[in-house]
């Protein structure tokens, strides 16, 4: 997402608002609040491309795990067991 003048990313700010408050405002009528229910968020990051910084306000809503890429023999074992 593009970083605006104030250093925020609008799409991430909207997701963060929903995760914190459970609702978002209607863009056509800012006095109307929409409650979004039964939503689960799953996210992943590519360590070799894109932005390497995460908004801390958004990240605090996720459990963060870091794993290394498996070796070629491990990948063969995994995918050979599937097929």
Image: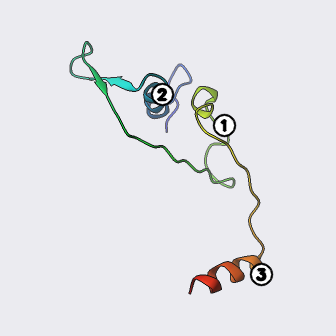
On screen, residue 40 versus residue 72, left or right, reads left
In this view, the residue in front, 69 or 9, is 69
Residue 48, image x, y percentages: 68, 55
Check whether the beta carbons of the residues at disc 3 and disc 1 lie within 8 A of each other: no
**Which residue position is annotated with label 3?**
73
- Alpha carbon separation for disc pair 3 and 1: 32 Å
Camera-side mark, 3 or 1: 3
> Which of 80 and 16 lies nearest the eye of the viewer?
80
Q: Residues within 10 Å of mark 2 (few under 14, many from 20)?
A: some
**Residue 71 drawn above or below residue 5:** below
Q: Is residue 37 above or below residue 48?
A: above
Q: Earlier in the sequence, mark 1 or mark 2?
A: 2
Name the secondary structure under disc 2.
Answer: helix
Find the distance from the CA under tag 1 to the CA under tag 2.
14 Å
The type of colouring in the image is rainbow
Q: Read off the residue under disc 1.
A: 53
Q: Secondary structure at mark 3?
A: helix
Discs 1/2, front: 2
Q: Residue furthest front?
A: 38
Q: Nearer the viewer, residue 47 or 56?
A: 56
Q: CA distance from mark 2 to mark 3?
A: 41 Å
83 versus 47 height, above or below: below
Name the spot of residue 69 as percent of width and height, x first: 74, 65
Quick check: 12 left or right of 37? Answer: right
Q: Nearer the viewer, mark 2 or mark 3?
A: 3
Q: Residue at x 45, y 25 (%)?
A: 17
First in sequence: mark 3 or mark 1?
1
- Look at the image and tell me in which quarter the C terminus lies: bottom right
N-terminal label among 2 and 3: 2
Q: Residues within 10 Å of mark 3 (few under 14, many from 20)?
A: few
Mark 1 Cα-neighbour bin, 10 Å: few <14, some 14–19, many ≥20: few
Which residue carries the number 2 mark?
A: 13
């Amino acid at each position: 997402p593009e970083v605006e003048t104030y250093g925020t990313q609008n799409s991430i700010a909207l997701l963060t608002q929903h995760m914190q408050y459970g609702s978002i405002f209607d863009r056509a009528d800012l006095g109307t609040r929409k409650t979004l229910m039964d939503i689960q968020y799953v996210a992943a990051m590519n360590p070799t491309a894109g932005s390497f910084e995460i908004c801390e306000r958004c990240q605090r809503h996720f459990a963060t795990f870091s794993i290394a890429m498996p070796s070629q023999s491990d990948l063969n074992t995994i995918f050979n067991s599937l097929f």
